[in-house]
Image (spheres, rainbow, N blue to C red):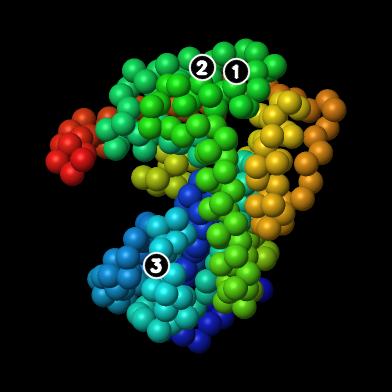
Amino acid sequence: MTAEFSNTASRPHVFVLGRAKTGTTFIAKSIESACPAAPVRFIMEPKTQRDISRAATASTNSTLIMKVLFDHWDTQRDALDDIVAGVSQPVFHSRIAIVRDPRDEIISRMMFRPFSFLVSGHARAEDVERWANVLEQREKNQKMTFLDIQKAFAATFPSASDPADEIRLIARLCMGYADYLKQNQTVFTTLRYEDAVADDFSAIEQALGWQVSKTQDLGRFGYTKRSGAATNWAKWFHPSDLETIKDLMGPACTALGYHDWSTPADVNRAIEPEHHSEYARGLVRQYRRQGGAARTFIQRFRNRLFA
């Protein structure tokens, strides 16, 4: 396959679907950077059919790389079906679905949620600093269990769920996503996050019509990237965690194609400050760069108004 676009359509629009914290931004930006059909416009997480129609109308001369979170469309299945089937505009040349190991998703979600709490007004910078201190303890003490860390997270952020409830929630959402992909297996071409971080995009290149290699440049969305690694759960989950977590989310892992629960006896359980305590503090800096105080004031006002 050459880098030259092989499709006969005027614009090879790409629809990239995935769940939150499963590498959707990184993969969609990699597709965008390799797309030969310039100009290209990246559309970040439209939440309604109207959002997508507006993007298409405003970009009639551009190739659209549209990154969509399944989480936002779980209650809009009919609209989502119409979009991917080409019933509404724009018509997508290829539809890519991303899957990631739910066990790694738990970790990635936990690490990014403080940013969401800051934006929603459910946390302050000092709360995130306390959380960073917890992570520093784990960086120094590899015997701390993942469930203990989750309990500390829930104690630090009052809006957080009970650890077991959080795992059940992710398992339920993953099962819903797996069911949707099974029902639409002829519509989507699936790419595993683990292959993408290994710079293997071969599973989707025929569907796209061009070659892809992973990009390091996420532009203004760079803060969404943490470690860019796979199988972090093996270093995070203490042996005492595994039975509980497998009981809560084993079926969800199986449904998405992740069956192996074995960990090497000599696994290195060290976690890096760059991707944990320092990353948490970096979320506060990003929040402030984005005008966080003003945004949070407005959100808190709305929370009180509609409480």
Q: Is residue 142 above or below residue 255?
A: above
Contact between marks 1 and 2 (CB within 8 A): the answer is yes
Disc 1 crowd rating (10 Å Cα; few below 14, some 14-19, many 20+) is: many
Visible residue check, residue 2: no
Mark 3 or mark 2: whose residue is earlier in sequence: 3
Rendered residue at 37%/78% (across/down): 90
- Image quarter in which the C terminus is found: top left
120 or 67, which lies in front? 120
Percent across and percent down for residue 157 are 40, 26
Numbered circle sitting on residue 138: 1
Mark 3 or mark 1: whose residue is earlier in sequence: 3
180 or 272, which lies in front? 180
Rendered residue at 65%/13% (across/down): 141
Disc 2 crowd rating (10 Å Cα; few below 14, some 14-19, many 20+) is: some
Rendered residue at 40%/84% (across/down): 87
Q: Is residue 131 left or right of residue 303?
A: right
Residue under numbered circle 3: 76
- Image quarter in which the N terminus is found: bottom right
**Secondary structure under badge 1?**
helix
Residue under numbered circle 2: 134
Q: CA distance from mark 3 to mark 1?
A: 40 Å
Nearer the camera: disc 3 or disc 2: 3
Name the kind of residue labelled 1 in the image. Answer: Arg
Disc 3 crowd rating (10 Å Cα; few below 14, some 14-19, many 20+) is: some
**Secondary structure under badge 3?**
loop
Q: Is residue 282 above or below residue 247?
A: above
Q: CA distance from mark 3 to mark 2?
A: 38 Å
